Image (cartoon, rainbow, N blue to C red):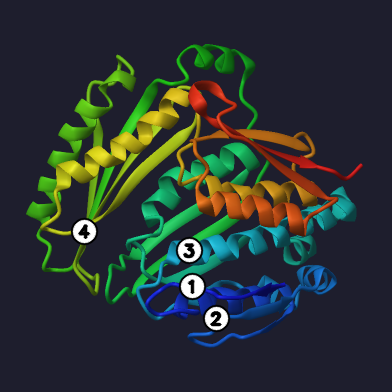
Amino acid sequence: LRVVRIRGKRSKPGLRPQHLRGLEFVRDFSGGAMAGLEAGSTEVAFNPSEDAFLGQAERSESGVWIEEHLLDVKTAGACTLLLQTALPLVVASLVVAKRRARRAGEAEEKSKQRRKLFPSAQRLCLKGGTDVPHAPLVDYVALVLAPNLERLFGLHLAVDVRRRGFFPKGGGEVRVGVELRSPRRPDPATATDAGKDRKVIRRCEIRVVSGHKKISQGQTRALAKVAEETVRADLAAFLHPDISQVGVTMAHDSKSLSPGLAFLVVVETCDGRTLGAGETLNAKSDWAEAVGAACAELRAPLRAGALDNHMQDQLLVLMALFAKLGHDEGAATRTVPVASPLTLHAQTCVALINEMLRGEVALTVQEGGGEAGASLIQCKSLKG
């Protein structure tokens, strides 16, 4: 695999520290060979080895099964984008371990030796920016991505934010536990009831975070107040009648190395979908306008019974991975409605997956084929 003209039109072309650290993790974890790993490089060549990765995943002494994998950007590069890089590899190792454990037999599964050789969880320590522009907020990972991954794939993420990292210094720290469980099957009676009100919000939460002594807790409370008023007005048509108030949680991290503000609007629908939208702000931002824009992002997928547009490319790689490895035998074909139109990230991801996994997995997209213009992404295993 050769990637050329990396970030070719940026003011500083080529790899930045966060890209380097992610690629180094891919190389070390997978056992493949990689060239071009240096700051500013505009070309990277990767020779993956599926046999090498499977061998590493099956040997308890290999670097795949250390106590905790550390990915430290040493800048304000986004921790959450590092997680997007590392998560598929970690998940693949857990699927391999689960398959070997199943083959080992019930008696060995219950032994201490089995737990040592076939772990069911991995841990990551990510250091860098937790809440920075042009990347998912860490609270989006914890409150939106995590519940959707557990609902769809049985993939449990436990996210622990030790320190917030804002631009420009970063310095944030997040620990993420990754555990493979059985996908949750909806109860038929509940699913039938939910279908009537699946566009209705049964839970709405606003998360407001800040950091550094230059941001006062009074500013945090002021942003929370603006956000609550805006959300209640802009999403009123979707709120369940039983919701008497919108939940607001605030967190201020005085240990943060740079001042920062961020908010996230999280909604859970009656059919179990979790959606979110938010961004980083500063004291001079138009807070009501920013929260209003986030609510506007949520209205379209709410009407369409779909997931939000930030979820698109974060799901695609995992959908293909589980289809290839066969973690969930009951879902060889899976269809997920997402907001339209597909983002450029998602379109690129679909094309690459279909090229790289040709003959094993097929991803198809029906733009606007769902209710209220939602796009339908279908992932199908082509094996047997």
Distance from the alpha carbon under mark 2 to that under mark 4: 35 Å
Disc 3: which residue: 81
The answer to whether mark 3 and mark 2 are in CB contact below 8 A is no
Residue tagged 2: 42
Can residue 305 be seen here? The reply is no
Give the number of the mark in front: 3 or 2.
2
Out of 152 and 341, give the one closest to the viewer.
341
Q: Amino acid at mark 3?
A: Leu
Q: Is residue 191 left or right of residue 332?
A: left
Q: Position of residue 59 (x, y in %)?
A: 80, 73
**Which residue has dot 4 on it?**
210
Is there CB contact under 8 Å for labels 1 and 2? Answer: yes
- Mark nearer the N terminus (3 vs 1): 1
Choose the circle earlier in sequence order: 4 or 3: 3
Callout 2–callout 4 Cβ contact below 8 Å: no
| Whole-number angstrom distance, CA of label 1 to CA of label 4 | 31 Å
